[in-house]
């Protein structure tokens, strides 16, 4: 995928969006075709660590034991200790889920995490996932985990043939947004069963703007 075409598309998306009182997000939208979502091999559910942060704070909650309590309280936006798993209410859990983007958990207490939080976090897609680096050892340094999550996105297909990926906010430099888009497109396309033949169209849009269509002139290569 040509970075110049991505840059042109981002610039077109910027032009189509009126200035708002908040920083709009630029989203990558990949429309799919020739896939059967009843087949697990045709579904997309992955995590990508983009080259650049998304321009806004990604909030993280920690579900940990005493081993990580000090580090979690210092690094995370919310911390729930194992000793409070049985007493925390559904209302309190939902309040936390509304405020965070990721949950991390201590690996050796994952059965207790699943028992206490699975019914709420599971349907929301927020259960701590080892693929995202969100299941950590009791001795882990949480700072690099939190830093990596600031650049992590979770592209997935649900009931529609489309993947949406945030690339960053409008105040970011075009070059950073291009890098994030280039990385996301190439990794996602290479993960599809028929690669570019499963792509119907690719668009980029701001939150309140019209989508700009990316011209697919060059063959996409998987990013290594």
Image (cartoon, grey):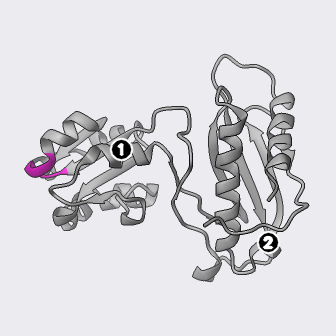
The quadrant of the picture occupied by the N terminus is bottom right
Q: Is residue 129 left or right of residue 23?
A: left
Q: Is residue 4 left or right of residue 159?
A: right
Residue 169 or 20: which is nearer the viewer? 169
Q: Helix, strand, or loop for circle 1?
A: helix
Rounded to the nearest angstrom, the CA distance separating label 2 from label 1 is 33 Å
The quadrant of the picture occupied by the C terminus is bottom right
Please tell me whether residue 79 is drawn above or below residue 133 in the rendered image.
Answer: above
Q: Earlier in the sequence, mark 2 or mark 1?
A: 1
* Image quarter of residue 78: top left
* Image quarter of residue 2: bottom right
Span shown in magenta: 64-68
Indicate the position of residue 69 as horizontal and vertical percent values.
14, 43
Is the magenta region chiefly helix, strand or loop?
helix
* Image quarter of residue 178: top right
Residue 118 or 55: which is nearer the viewer? 55
What is the crowding at mark 2: few (fewer than 14 residues within 10 Å), some, or many (at least 20)? many
Indicate the position of residue 31 as horizontal and vertical percent values.
78, 61
Q: Is residue 169 visible?
A: yes
Q: Which residue is mark 1?
A: 146
* Residue at figure coordinates x 27%, y 37% from the top left: 75
Please tell me whether residue 160 is drawn above or below residue 3 in the rendered image.
Answer: below
43 is within the stretch colored magenta: no
* Residue at figure coordinates x 63%, y 25% from the top left: 23
- As drawn, the label of residue 196 is 2
* Residue at figure coordinates x 9%, y 51% from the top left: 67
Give the number of marks: 2
Q: Is residue 224 left or right of residue 143?
A: right
């Amino acid at each position: 995928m040509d970075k110049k075409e991505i840059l042109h598309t981002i610039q077109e998306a910027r032009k189509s969006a009126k200035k708002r009182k908040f920083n709009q997000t630029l989203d990558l939208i990949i429309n799919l075709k020739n896939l059967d979502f009843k087949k697990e091999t045709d579904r997309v559910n992955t995590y990508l660590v983009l080259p650049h942060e998304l321009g806004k704070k990604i909030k993280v909650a920690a579900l940990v034991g005493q081993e990580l309590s000090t580090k979690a309280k210092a690094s995370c936006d919310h911390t729930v200790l194992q000793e409070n798993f049985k007493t925390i209410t559904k209302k309190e859990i939902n309040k936390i889920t509304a405020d965070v983007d990721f949950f991390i958990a201590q690996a050796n207490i994952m059965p207790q995490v699943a028992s206490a939080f699975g019914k709420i976090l599971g349907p929301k897609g927020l259960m701590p996932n080892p693929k995202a680096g969100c299941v950590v050892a009791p001795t882990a340094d949480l700072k690099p985990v939190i830093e990596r999550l600031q650049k992590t996105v979770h592209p997935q297909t649900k009931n529609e043939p489309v993947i949406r990926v945030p690339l960053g906010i409008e105040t970011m430099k075009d070059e950073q947004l291009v890098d994030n888009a280039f990385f996301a497109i190439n990794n996602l396309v290479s993960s599809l069963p028929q690669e570019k033949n499963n792509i119907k169209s690719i668009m980029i849009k701001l939150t309140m703007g019209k989508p700009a269509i990316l011209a697919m002139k060059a063959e996409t290569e998987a990013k290594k």
